[in-house]
Each structure stands twice: as C-alpha cells, then as structure tokens.
Image: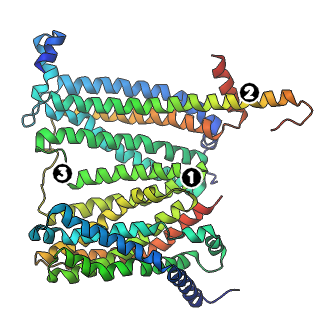
Amino acid sequence: MSTLSHFFALSGEAAAFFRMGGYAGYVWPAYAVFFVVLIADNVAPRLRRRRILRELRGRLARQVARERRSPSSTPAP
Amino acid sequence: MAKWIPLWLHKLGSPPTFYRFAGAVRPWAMGLALLFGVIGLYGGLVLAPPDYQQGDAYRIIFIHVPSAWMSMFVYAVMGVSGFIALVWRLKLAEVVAMESAPIGAAFAFITLATGSLWGKPMWGTWWTWDARLTSELVLLFLYLGVIGLYHAFEDRRQGARAASFLAIIGVINVPIVHYSVVWWNTLHQGSTVSIFGHSKMPWEMLWPLLAMTLATKCYYAASLCRRARTDILALESGKDWVREIAQAEAAR
Amino acid sequence: MNAPLPRACAAMLRRDLMLAWRRRGDLAMPVLYAVIVVVLFPFALGPDLALLQRIAGGVVLVTVLLAMLLALDAMFASDIEDGSLEQLVLAPQPLALMLGMKILAHWITTALPLIVIAPLLAGMLHLPAAAMPALLLALLLATPLLSLLGAVLVALTAGTRRSGMLLALMLLPLCVPVVIFAAGAVTAAQEGLPWFAPVAWLTAALILAVVLAPLACAAALRIALDS
C-alpha cells in the first residue's frame, strides 16, 4: 500500500485512511464489489430499455413501410 | 376486487399510471439513496473509530450487513408480490416479483463476497459452513433458480407465475435450511464464530450502519422502479402509449 | 366415465409401471450412473481404507441423489409430449392424487433399484456393516422425499423446453436439509452414536411432503400448462 500512497503523493492522514489499519487489501475490494455490482445492476435495465425501444421503433417503421407499399389493404391493428 | 381497496390503488395497478408513478418516484429514491449513502460512508469510513478487536477491518460491516438485510427483505417482497400475482393475477405484482429477483441476487452476491473478504482476516478463512453463510448461499441459489425459471418460459407472464410459485416454496425452505445447518453444525462440532464479537455496538458505529441500511432500502426502491418501468415497456410494447414514448425518445 | 377413486389410482400406477417396464433399458441408466460415480471416487482419492470409510455414507447419498436428478427430468416428459398430462388435468379424479400415483411409480422405477444396489456401492467404499441399516433407512426416507420435492419442480418446468440444468439449480436449495439429515444419520451410526433423531426428522419431513407435495405439484402443473 505504501507504493500506492507514494504514487498519489498523499499526506500522512489520507495515507492512513487508505491503509485502513493494514486491512486495505480486504476493506477496499469489499467496497469495490459493492459499488461495481450495484452500478452493473443500474446499467443493465438502462441498456435493456434502449434495446426495447429501438426494436419497437424498428417494428413501427417496417409497419409504416408495408402500409405505404399496399395502401389498399386494411392496416393491421 | 374488494371494495376496501382505495381507488388510487386500482389506478396504480394500470401499467401506464404505474409507469409515470415509478418515473416520478425513482429520482427521489435515488437521490435519498445517494444522500444516505454519502452520510453513512463518511460516518462509517472516516468518523467511526476502529474496533478494539478487529481494527479497521470491521468497516466492511457498513456494506455487508445492510446487503444481507436487503437480500432477505427483497426476498420477502418477491414472495409477497409473487403470492399476489398468483392469487389475483395482477400484472404489476408479477413485474415487481420478477424484477426484484435480480436486485436481490445482487445483494446476496455482495453479502457473500464482502463476507468472504471480511472472514479472511478475522477468521483466517474465506468460507466456513456456518448456518448463516450457508443460508445466504442457498438464498442466492434460490434467486438464481427463480431468475432461471422465469427466463425458461417463452410466455413471460406464465414464466412469472411459475417463478412466483418457486419463490413461495423458497420462503418455506430458507428457515428449514437455516435450522438444519444449525443442527448439522452442532453434530459436527463446527466453528461457533459469531459475526459480532460483542453484541452491543457503540453509537458512533451504529448510526452509519443505520444510514447505510436506509441507503440500500432507497436504492432498492429506485432500482425496482427503473427495472419495473423497463419491464412494463417490454410487456406493453404493442400499446399506443409505449409507441408514443418510443417516438418521443427517437426525437431527442 | 367416472371410475371409482381406488380403481383410478391403481390404473394410473399400473399404466406408469407398465410404460416403464416396456423401456427397461432406461431404468438401468441411473443405476449404471451411480456405479460409475462410486467407482471413480477411489481412483480420485486413492485406495486409503480409512478415508474411503469416512466418506462412504456421504458419497453414496450424493450419488443416489444425482442419479435421481438424472431421471427426474423424464418424470412427466413423455406424458407432456403425447398430451396425456393435459387429459389428466381435465379428468374428474383429483389431480393431486393422480400425480401422487405418478410420483410413486417414478420412485419405484428409479429410486428402488438405486436403494437395492446401495449396499453394494457402500461395500465398495468399505462402509462398516454397523452403519448399513442406517444408510438403508436414510435412503428409504430420503429418496421418496426427493422424488416428491423434485416432482413439484418438474411440474413447474413442464411448460419449458430446456430444463435439465435448471432443475438441478432449483433442486439444490430444497435438498440441502434432506442431505444433511440423511448423511447425519449415517455419520452418527458410523461413530456409534444414536441416530434416531435425524431419522425422525426425515420421517416427519416425508409425512409432510406426502401430504403437501402432490397438492403443490398439481398447483404447479396448472400454472405451467395454463396458456
């Protein structure tokens, strides 16, 4: 951990905070897991929403194109 | 349905209304989650003194214990809404039950991973077959089973009902697993480590824990809103109001 | 065509047993699988007698469980394919009872052969003779329990296409207590301790499951086939 605090050129107090009393190797990975999993949980539905709407727009566009090609037929509900 | 249920609840059950409602609630819940999270983390990581036995390693508690509570709370929500989905066939209850499952699985996974990272310096091992740990692992498997069963069906509503049934079976199963592992451990003379070396927690450590608990609760509400909204869009993709949303979002 | 209940039950049981007998090659599969798994253990762990003795009970139990899991998938498969399961749902006889008969038939055709060869498997791993009655009794109680619990899950996956791995994932949380108590009885018998308590727990669980599992199975099947 000392190399890391040297790298960031931290003052004594902040370095002590990041050292976590010698348990840095356990405390920070635990917090990293917590945030990575929750961010992933947040991003997944956002991507799904975008995909759903894109697919829906594609379907609507195809439907419009089909109606333009054969205007005589009754439009599908 | 019964007359005592107020009208606004009936209205909330309709997908477009719930979609707007969840959209209005979500930013507030997320904001509260971030606020409580920042307060709790500052209190837990900076203000709280090191533990006299565990040093600074105990600071994992501020994410580990709230996640463990949430993994059980989310399961309870899933079980109850699964029951409602089975009895009254409410589409919204199905959505809530099935969209809770991934969040609960995430919290169960966090609990196991952080618990393992905490156990290594404190107990000298990544894993022990303690009743609490085993029950949490079983809970994760139950979540995975529910998610797997839901996605195995081609008809999503049918899958949601089947998975809700599995969730209800799990509600009965988890206490049985817990007590059978307790019995098994006493038979095998297993380790009797308790997570809290001392039962009474000083206030400086307790309030960040409570703040983090509130933060995870609010986070769950926010995440559930986002997931439910997405799922409703998928379920109702043939309806006009969803088309309007799709067109409006294309214009942006 | 409203046949009296006992006759309907007997007919159901006879039909399933006869169907199983016509395909007796399939019946040998779980047994063969169990033998292969148990034979592989000494090769993997070395022929150390004390070690094999210590793990014998657990290995036999887990092997039997996995062999049952292998056959569980097929419990309702052929009936779903030819539509007779849907006929059963529509039949005037109570569905839970009929499913109970199907589960019984399935237990007789898959678990019973496994219990019969269990002493052989345990003997290959040098399980002490003193622990043999405990092992057999534990198997006799645990296998119907697994059949009943498994049937509920199989019914839930009845409407899906791929279900093999999913079934294992869903069964694992449910079979943890069963394995704990069954293996607990064998371990206690091996150490010369009284092994009544775990057997009593298994019996209690089995009685509960005999009553509740067919009902749950019927409810699950109605959900999975309803479309």
Look at label 1 and name its amino acid.
Answer: Phe
**For the image shown, how many numbered marks are present on the structure?**
3
Residue at the spot of label 2: A61
| Of the two numbered discs 2 and 3 in the rendering, the one whose residue sits closer to the viewer | 2
Which of the labelled discs sits on residue B153, or is there none? 1
Q: Secondary structure at mark 2?
A: helix
In the picture, the quarter occupied by the C terminus of chain A is top right
Look at label 2 and name its amino acid.
Answer: Ala
| Image coords of residue A5 (percent x, y) | 15, 15
Instruction: Using a 10 Å C-alpha cutoff, classify the residue at mark 3 as few (fewer than 14 neighbours), some (14 to 19) or many (20 or more).
Output: some
| Image coords of residue C198 (percent x, y) | 23, 74
Instruction: Using a 10 Å C-alpha cutoff, classify the residue at mark 1 as few (fewer than 14 neighbours), some (14 to 19) or many (20 or more).
Output: many
Residue at image coords 29%, 24%: B39
Q: CA distance from mark 2 to mark 1?
A: 29 Å
Q: Is residue B202 visible?
A: yes
Residue at the spot of label 3: B128
Chain name for mark 2: A
Q: Secondary structure at mark 1?
A: loop
| Image coords of residue C101 (percent x, y) | 51, 80
